[in-house]
Image: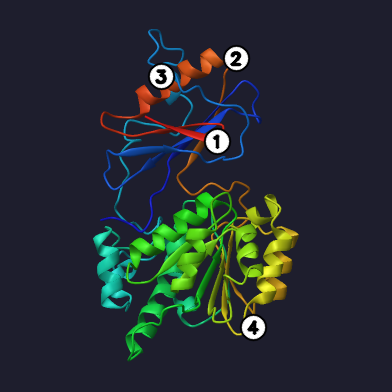
Amino acid sequence: MTTATSKPVASFLLSDKLGLGCGCLSLRPLRSKKALLLRPELRRMRGGVSCSAVAAPESLLSEDFLRGLGGFDGDIMSVDDSDDEDRNGGVTGDELEVKRLGLPQRLVESLELRGITQLFPIQRAVLVPALEGRDIIARAKTGTGKTLAFGIPIMKKLSEDDAARSSQRRLGRFPRVLVLAPTRELAKQVEKEIQDSAPYLSTVCVYGGVSYTSQQSALRRGVDVVVGTPGRLIDLIKGNSLQLDEVQFLVLDEADQMLAVGFEEDVEVILETLPPKRQSMLFSATMPAWVNKLARKYLDKPLTIDLVGHQDEKLAEGIKLYAIPAATSNSKRSILSDLIAVFLPNKSYSIIFDINEPIYH
């Protein structure tokens, strides 16, 4: 059985100054139990992991040392795909099956083609109140499947609306869904998740640092879903390329990170342009004062769904984060080589991030 997201299981921070590290890696299960991906969990780290990492003739970190860090055993690379009551908050597997949720058949088929047959707890918790039209504040850690938590109910409603229309969707139509994300990486990930899950919907991802032309052309042709970063959205609104008069659904994804990257003013400007009659969903791992202010001002009697509680850490359940001291750049390279050799099986994949540029392994 495949669930509706992939969960990283470990992150490694290599640094000669812990807290100002050179890079962060996480082991993330893909569709196969044996296929793993290394990806960054801390995107704003300083320094870098050398791209010339090669197997060291003498290991600085033995396998026993790495396993002695805790949380790793012989089965660490095998993710148990069975659903138990502890993992799903007492919900049985049948209740989480996508085909039993009353979704439009073509949406179910699209999800099943992606291997998505069951929901994670955050997705199930959000589904019913979202389908009822409630505004929602959802606290969930990164890696818990937030995108499909808001994506599935929205895609269901759009699919049903389109099926009820007697005519084809018009060219040049205004978007019905607006998703705000703090970074281009997250925006692209969210847009791809929606497009892959509902390919019959038209989506566009807008973000800065690239030409306006292709984004403006997509908007002129007409779209159902716009996913973007606040800065580029503001530019498109000011240039009359983006009209938000018909937005029915607003999603603020990782709202606390909007504050961290300085988007608070832009976010509020965008929200002021939206129709007052809409459904709004806010997802955030933490609830700083500004996020609470947004919720009070722009959400209508929201339902709060909290899967974080009083836990301090923001990592998703099942992730282990390790800080490994490294005195020099050479030792970082050797440690990195050992991590790959010990924890990645044959025919696995990794991405090593050096400051801003990924190096694929």
Q: What amino acid is found at the position of numbered circle 3 in the picture?
A: Asp
Extreme residue toward the bottom, this view: 166
Q: Circle 2: is it few (<14), some (14-19), or many (20+) Cα within 10 Å?
A: few
Query: Could you tell me if the residues under marks 4 and 1 are in contact, i.e. CB atoms within 8 Å?
Result: no
Dot 4: element: loop
**What element does badge 1 sit on?**
loop
Q: Nearer the viewer, residue 203 or 197?
A: 203
Q: Residue at x 53, y 46 (%)?
A: 315
Q: CA distance from mark 1 to mark 2?
A: 22 Å
Whole-angstrom CA distance, mark 2 to mark 3, is 21 Å
Q: Which of the two discs, 3 and 4, sits closer to the camera?
A: 4
Q: In the rendered image, which residue does mark 1 sit on?
A: 356
According to the image, label 4 marks what residue? Answer: 276
Q: Quadrant of residue 19?
A: top right
Q: Which mark is residue 64?
A: 3
Q: Position of residue 288 (x, y in %)?
A: 71, 57
The mark nearer the N terminus, 4 or 1, is 4
